Image (cartoon, rainbow, N blue to C red):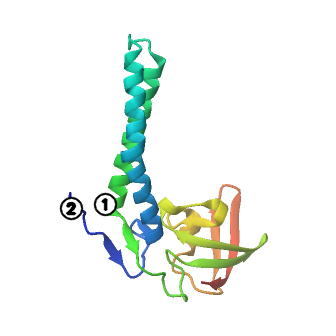
Amino acid sequence: MAQKKRKQQEYASEEEEYISKEGYEALRQELEELKNERRVEIAQKLKFAKSLGDLSENAEYNQAKEEHTINEAKIAQLEDFLSRATIIKKPPPADRVGVGSTVIVSSKMGLERYTIVGTHEVDIATGKVSNESPFGKAFLGKIKKDTVVVRTPKGNIEYSIVDIC
């Protein structure tokens, strides 16, 4: 099956779904594992559960069917996203915040470092925030020394951009 050519863009804007080359490869690898390994595991579970007899009250069979449904939904979701995603070839210019930028900000909580990423690469523990989140949206297009106000459920938080990497 021929693979579709992926859209590639020099710099990211805020309207589309973006992903780094590394993030794309990680999701592609996850998709392959779901299709080639997880499907086989689930098929074996289904075969075993069917061998137990009556399927109407067979907990193993019902669980394997549910795992199959979840796996197939995840496969469809990843295939859809990967077919539409725009791979960012390089980070945006260092003078303006965009998808792929790392920003160092100052707030009442001190200095913090965040990287603006596409929705499929979010990892709050490592400071990777979505370009579609209120936080990410507030920073897109801003420059060094700009003040940014982010609305949160607990109230507004003011940040000052110290640096853009």
Point 43% across, 22% down: residue: 62
Point 44% across, 53% down: residue: 30
Q: Amino acid at mark 2?
A: Ala
In this rendering, the answer to whether 33 lies above or below 112 is above
Label 1 Cα neighbours within 10 Å, binned few <14 / some 14-19 / many ≥20: some
Closer-to-camera residue (25/139): 25
Horizontal and vertical percent for residue 38?
42, 41
Q: Quadrant of residue 52?
A: top left
Horizontal and vertical percent for residue 114?
63, 72
Of the two numbered discs 1 and 2 on the same chain, state the one appearing first in sequence.
Answer: 2
Q: Secondary structure at mark 2?
A: loop
Q: Is residue 165 left or right of residue 79?
A: right
Q: Is residue 135 visible to us here? A: yes
Marks 1 and 2 sit apart, C-alpha to C-alpha, by 12 Å
Q: Amino acid at mark 1?
A: Ser
Q: Quadrant of residue 51?
A: top left
Q: Is residue 138 left or right of residue 91?
A: right
Q: Which mark is residue 83?
A: 1
Closer-to-camera residue (36/100): 36
Q: Is residue 20 visible to us here? A: no
Closer-to-camera residue (74/136): 74
Q: How many marks?
A: 2
Point 49% across, 74% down: residue: 99
Q: Which mark is residue 2?
A: 2
Image quadrant holding the N terminus, namely: bottom left
In this rendering, the answer to whether 53 lies above or below 64 is above
Image quadrant holding the C terminus, namely: bottom right
